[in-house]
Amino acid sequence: MREKSQELFAQSNRFIPGGVNSPVRAFKSVGTDPIFYERAKGSHVWDADGNEYIDFVASWGPMILGHAPDAVLDAVREQLDKGTSFGAPTEIELKMAEAVSAAVPSVEEVRMVSSGTEATMSAIRLARGYTGREKFIKFDGNYHGHSDALLVAAGSGLVTLGIPSTPGVTKGAAADTVVLPYNDLEAVRATLAEIGEQVAAIILEPVAGNMGVVPPAEGFLEGLRALCDEYGVVLIFDEVISGFRVALGGAQERYGVTPDLTTLGKIIGGGFPVGAFGGKREIMQSLAPMGPVYQAGTLSGNPVAMVAGLALIAELKKPGVYDELERKGARLEAGLRAAVEAAGVEAYLTRVGSMACMFFAKGPVTDWSSAAKSDTERYARYFNGMLERGFTLAPSQFEATFVGLAHTDADIDAMTSAAGEVLRSL
Ligand SMILES: *Cc1c(COP(=O)(O)O)cnc(C)c1O
C-alpha cells in the first residue's frame, strides 16, 4: 500500500512544517496523507512504495509534455557541463526573451524571475511605479502567488484550507488591494468610476485556475481592456497557469485581448523554478537599470532553467500541438460528462483547452461565490476513489485537472471510466 509514504510523511513532519514545502501538497482537505513520489515519466508517476499512477496534476501545470520529456532532459544535461549559474548575462536568456516575445502577444520586453509569486509581485510594483498610483484591483478566488498585497481573497491553497485572510499580512499591505467578484464587469466599472484615478492596475487570471477552472464570461476581458484604456489603468494578465497552456500565447492569444503586462510561470520553466513578467516596452523601461522601479534576482535567468524552458517551448511550437491538446481535453470532458450523467450525480464541468474541472455543485460556476457552493466532502471521496484506482488528481476541489501531450487516449478513457465507477459509488 502506501506505508513508505506514510513513514516519510511522519518523519517529514518533524523537520518541515506540516511535512510539506507548499501547503497545497498536504492532502488535508481530502483527509489522506500525501503521497511521496520517487520518479515520473510521461503520463505516469511512481510513489515511494512503488505504486504506479496515471497523473492528472502535472506538477500543478508545468508538465504539459508529460514528465521528464527527453527533449528537456537532453537540453539540461548539455547545459550542466557548461555551468549551472554565472550571475552574468548569457545568450540563452536572449533566446528565451525572443521566444517569449514571439509567442505572447503583449510581450515586447520580458524579465525572468524564479517563481510566479515573484513575477506577479514585480508586475504590481512596476504598474504602481509606472502610473504613480497605489491601489489595484484583483478578483475574489484568483490566486497570484503569496506576496502580501496579493494574498487577499486568494484562491488555491487558501480556499482549500479555508483561510480567508492570513495573519502576517498587515492592514497597511492589504489596504490598497480592492477585491471584486470575477466576471463582474459592472462592479469594475462602478469601482473605477469612483476611484479610477487612484488605480494602478487590474490583475486577473484570464482563465481562472485556482478556484477550480472558471472561464472568462463573454465580453469580460474585452470590457476590462476598454475600462483600463479609459482610466489609464495597467491591465495585467496573470498567465502563470494559462500561459503556454490554453494556447502558445496563452489566454490573450485564445481570446484575442492584449493586456499591458503579462506574468508567466509553471510551464515556462520546463519543470524548473522560473517565472517571468513582460509587456509593453514603455512600461518595462521603468525597471532598473533603465528606470527607477527596482527588481532583481541572483538566480534570475538561470541557464539550466532557461534551456529547460526553451526546449519545452520548442516542442510546443511544433504544428498541431494545441489542436492535439484541445482534442485530448475534449475527450476527457466528454468522458467525464458521460460518467456524471450515468451516475446521476450533481456536477458542473468546465474546461478551457487542456485544463478542466468537475465542480460538485449544480452550477453554473462563474465566480468564487458559485464555486464555493461545491460539496468538498464529495470531492474528497471522489479524489480518494480515483487514487485507489491509480489516478492522481489535485487534492482539492478548487484546482484544475490537466491533460498533457503524454496522455494517450487509453489513459484518458481509463481515467473517465474509473471516474464513472467512483461517481456511482458516492
Ligand atoms: C501558481 C500560480 C502563481 C504562483 O506561482 P508560484 O511559482 O507558485 O509562486 C501565481 N499566479 C497563478 C495564476 C498561479 O497559478
Image (cartoon, rainbow, N blue to C red):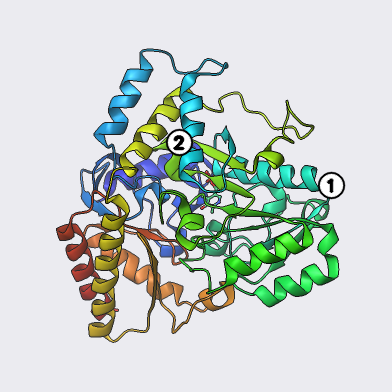
Indicate the position of residue 371 as horizontal and vertical percent values: 51, 74
Indicate the position of residue 7 as horizontal and vertical percent values: 34, 43
Residue at image position (50%, 36%) is: 274
Residue at image position (49%, 33%) is: 98
Kindly give the residue lying farthest to the left in the view shown: 410
Question: CA separation, marks 2 and 1?
Answer: 31 Å
Q: Nearer the viewer, mark 2 or mark 1?
A: 2
Answer with left or right where residue 403 lies relative to residue 226.
left
| 423 or 311, nearer to the observer | 311
Residue at image position (53%, 57%) is: 157
- Disc 2 marks which residue? 99
- Tell me the quarter of the image containing the C terminus: bottom left
- Disc 1 marks which residue? 132
Indicate the position of residue 358 as horizontal and vertical percent values: 38, 72
| Whether residue 160 is situated above or below residue 24 in the rendered picture | below
Answer with left or right where residue 282 lies relative to residue 267.
right
Image quarter for residue 288?
top right
Image quarter for residue 197?
bottom right
| Whether residue 102 is situated above or below residue 80 in the rendered picture | below
User: Tag 1, which secondary structure?
Assistant: loop
